[in-house]
Amino acid sequence: MSQQRRIDADQMRDHFESVLGSYEQVFEKFFLAKLIGLEFEYLPLEAADADKEVSRLTFTVNEMLMNPQGTLHGGIMATVMDISMGHLLRKAIGPGITVEMNTQFLRAAPPGLARAEARFVKKGRSLSFMESRLWGADDKLAALTTATWKML
Amino acid sequence: MSQQRRIDADQMRDHFESVLGSYEQVFEKFFLAKLIGLEFEYLPLEAADADKEVSRLTFTVNEMLMNPQGTLHGGIMATVMDISMGHLLRKAIGPGITVEMNTQFLRAAPPGLARAEARFVKKGRSLSFMESRLWGADDKLAALTTATWKML
Amino acid sequence: MSQQRRIDADQMRDHFESVLGSYEQVFEKFFLAKLIGLEFEYLPLEAADADKEVSRLTFTVNEMLMNPQGTLHGGIMATVMDISMGHLLRKAIGPGITVEMNTQFLRAAPPGLARAEARFVKKGRSLSFMESRLWGADDKLAALTTATWKML
Amino acid sequence: MSQQRRIDADQMRDHFESVLGSYEQVFEKFFLAKLIGLEFEYLPLEAADADKEVSRLTFTVNEMLMNPQGTLHGGIMATVMDISMGHLLRKAIGPGITVEMNTQFLRAAPPGLARAEARFVKKGRSLSFMESRLWGADDKLAALTTATWKML
């Protein structure tokens, strides 16, 4: 068994069964969010400043989410940051879609508990600008995303 | 059962078992690539022009990869395009990591067979610039990514 | 007199006087466009495919537009590509503003005649996606931009 | 004389003569920086945290730097933010070149005194990640840029 194998097949099956038994194709509970194992939290939304509203998503980096090098896949980083922004947007204003997204990959995120935090750069009626940051289990900033969102 | 449910739990379990039985944490076969169901193809690499080398990845958009709106999740688009570039880079030059990535989300990709194609914008010794495009089952361009890669 | 000095003070003064005498704060003729020395050209706009409509801007890279290293400044590359997209947008649909813009700087553009070409990635009612490419006097691709535009 | 005309031809000539008489193709003093009228300032570089090192560039938005709509041209915003990052990089580590740059245009910057501030997102030996923000004379955030830099 390789060093990279963080969870075994039975653990994966258990996780998958729990996803199958609990997912619904709605915010916070859709299959992909459940599969990644995302936990959602929102910080005070009544804050005066747009940039004080924050969504925080936590999840565990394991083999199912890794690249061949044994760290969190950049695509999953992008996915989690995208979800963190989309959920904050919906909570604060209403549902929207990602128009474009730019991600800087600063360093690898090792196995363990990672978190992403999204906030607004500028809220708008038709378009909003947002950013999200992702930290690895080593508490180091692994990725930074800025994105443009269009209200539905 | 909602209209969005494209595959049932048993099909998902079968797919998951097949992933568990076939994945290895190496290029083309790592868990995430198998889970998405990626098929890899490379077009002539001996071409004179850098932009004639292409990787083509195909996969089926189903409920496991969707957003709550019932279309392919933007994060999965980013993931597949990231993988398409990384695999072409490795095939053509050698392994590298994504430094940054910019994605424009042009339109939704409906359920069915989608494909992504990556090519070089400019090959370099230490850095390469690449792009990837993703088409939905309706054969319409759904997303365009440009990215910077650093050789390992 | 350094090797980098491509034009002398009198030539600069002559150019500046010609800018002062001809500029108007309207499309194609605003001060900045005249100062850079942009020439505008549009290729067939009645084309069926969005990506067949092209704006082509040409200008001469001289010391006024250079970085301290003696090549075209990246900010001027961005400026010219931004202008190339904005003018095509206005010609093809109507006036708009840049929402976001991502530029890859592929190689230096030497002194001499450079050109930028913009085209649509996807036209939309409220948002359009565009790209622009800039070639140096050596006929090599120096920069690639993708951008999102919002109609006014 | 239109309302947009913030400075007259004689003021422009005076400014141009002062640029001609003072520029040198070196950092802080190259033609383009002088033409825009950039003033450079650097905040404590001995700070422990990378993100405490800041460059601050101030300049006056006038007709020479405007788009046809009468506000600061997005390309000049990009140019100033690019320069703000490049100068901080050189001051803190050494000279580098922009690999890629992503700018979000949040709102128009009116005529008057504008400023840009750059800082590091992550310093690296071969690559550094930086960001820059630009505020208009109304003290509102007008643009946000993230960029990747390669050491020379």
Image: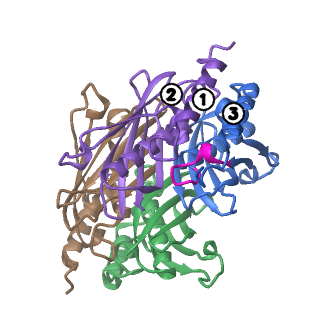
Chain colours: A brown, B green, C blue, D purple
Q: In the drawing, what numbered circle is on residue D108?
A: 2
User: What is the three-letter code of the residue carrying label 1?
Assistant: Glu
Q: Considering the numbered disc 3 on the image, is that residue within a helix, a strand or a loop?
A: helix
Q: Where is residue C128 in the image (x, y as percent from the top left)?
A: 61, 43
Instruction: Give x and y (percent) for residue A2.
Output: 21, 85
Residue carrying label 3? C13
Disc 1/disc 2 C-alpha distance (Å): 29 Å
Label 2's element? Answer: loop
Check whether the beta carbons of the residues at disc 1 and disc 3 lie within 8 A of each other: no
Question: Residue B23 appears in which quarter of the rendering?
Answer: bottom left
Magenta region's main secondary structure? loop
Residue D48 sits inside the magenta stretch: no
Crowding near the residue tagged with mark 2, few <14, some 14–19, many ≥20 C-alpha atoms within 10 Å: many
Q: Nearer the viewer, residue D142 or C9?
A: C9
* Location of residue B41 in the rendering, given as x and y in whole percent from the top left corner: 54, 80
Question: Which kind of residue does numbered mark 2 sit on?
Answer: Ala
State left or right for residue C94 relative to residue C45.
left
Q: State which tag comes first along the sequence, 1 or 2.
A: 1
- In the image, which disc is placed on residue D17? 1
Q: Mark 3 lies on which chain?
A: C
- Visible residue check, residue A28: no
Q: Badges 1 and 2: C-beta atoms under 8 Å apart?
A: no
> Can I make out residue C133 in this image?
yes
Q: Which residue is drawn at 55% across and 63% down?
A: B134
Residue C68 included in the magenta stretch of the image: yes
For image coordinates 57% across by 51% down, the residue present is C146
Q: What stretch is highlighted in magenta?
A: C61-72
In the drawing, does residue C151 fall left or right of residue C45? left
